[in-house]
Image: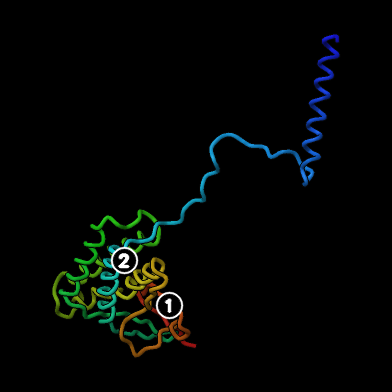
Amino acid sequence: MPLRASLLALACVGLVACDDKNAADPHGGGRETRTTGAAPSAQAAGPAPLSADFVAKAREVQTTARAIAATCKWNTHSTEWGDMYYDFCAFKKAQGEKLHAAVTALGASGLAPETGPAASFVDESRMFDAFVANALAGPEEYGYESASSRSRGTLSHYQDLAFAWNAMLSDEKVPVDEGNTSYTLGPADSGAPRHWERCGGLPCVKRMHP
């Protein structure tokens, strides 16, 4: 048989064989095509859970900070258009030292992620610690530079810390507003977090007159 005829015959046999395999497929499709190369990558893992040691150290910071915030009361300044509320607090040096020790232990643990809610909590802890340490520095007597006047803004800083805690451990949420008060402070009427502003350079909460 001439060479060209032989090649045509072989080609026809191959086509018939392919048709036969397609016909044998109950779904009417061709054979499964296998691809070479690396297997599909696994789904990206979520953030690693926080270690029990880190959570215990963070809880010590939160508990100590909350005790400091609980010493705060309020002063008010009224105008014809509204009331301005300033916090003043009576936390002691021993409480500040306890907070500093807890914040230091948390930061030195090396267990906090570099980003995310836990990292934010560590940052807020350091800022709250620095604020408390500054308020405790200097004379204790009442006056322009007294510990009481330097403590103004404690509840605003604590609110930031509590928000960070709640974002980090949503199953252990704490109130974000602390401080003993007989006042009704604006948004707190409806259970919303207090809205802090600046009044004369100091953190304050405003309640506008109707």
Q: Residues within 10 Å of mark 2 (few under 14, many from 20)?
A: some
Disc 2 marks which amino acid?
Val
Q: Are marks 1 and 2 in contact (CB under 8 Å)?
A: no
Indicate whether 3 appears above or below 155. above
Residue, disc 2: 55
The residue nearer to you, when weighing 156 against 191, is: 191
Q: Could you tell me if residue 200 is visible in this image?
A: no
The reply, left or right, for residue 67 in relation to residue 77 is: left
- Residue 119: quadrant of the picture: bottom left
Residue drawn 84% across and 19% down?
9
Task: Give the residue at the far top of this rendering.
Answer: 2
Of the 4 image quadrants, the one containing the N terminus is top right
Residue drawn 64% across and 37% down?
34
The residue nearer to you, when weighing 107 against 153, is: 107
Q: Nearer the viewer, mark 1 or mark 2?
A: 2
Q: CA distance from mark 1 to mark 2?
A: 25 Å
Callout 1: SS = loop
Task: Give the residue at the far front of this rendering.
Answer: 1
Image coordinates of residue 63 in percent, x first then y, are 27, 74
Image coordinates of residue 196 in percent, x first then y, are 39, 74
Indicate whether 46 appears above or below 72. above
Q: Which mark is residue 193?
A: 1
Residue drawn 81% across and 22% down?
11
Image coordinates of residue 188 in percent, x first then y, are 43, 83
The residue nearer to you, when weighing 186 against 166, is: 166
Image coordinates of residue 205 in percent, x first then y, are 39, 79
Q: Earlier in the sequence, mark 1 or mark 2?
A: 2
Disc 1 marks which amino acid?
Pro
Callout 2: SS = helix
- Residue 155: quadrant of the picture: bottom left
- Residue 95: quadrant of the picture: bottom left
What colour scheme does the image use? rainbow
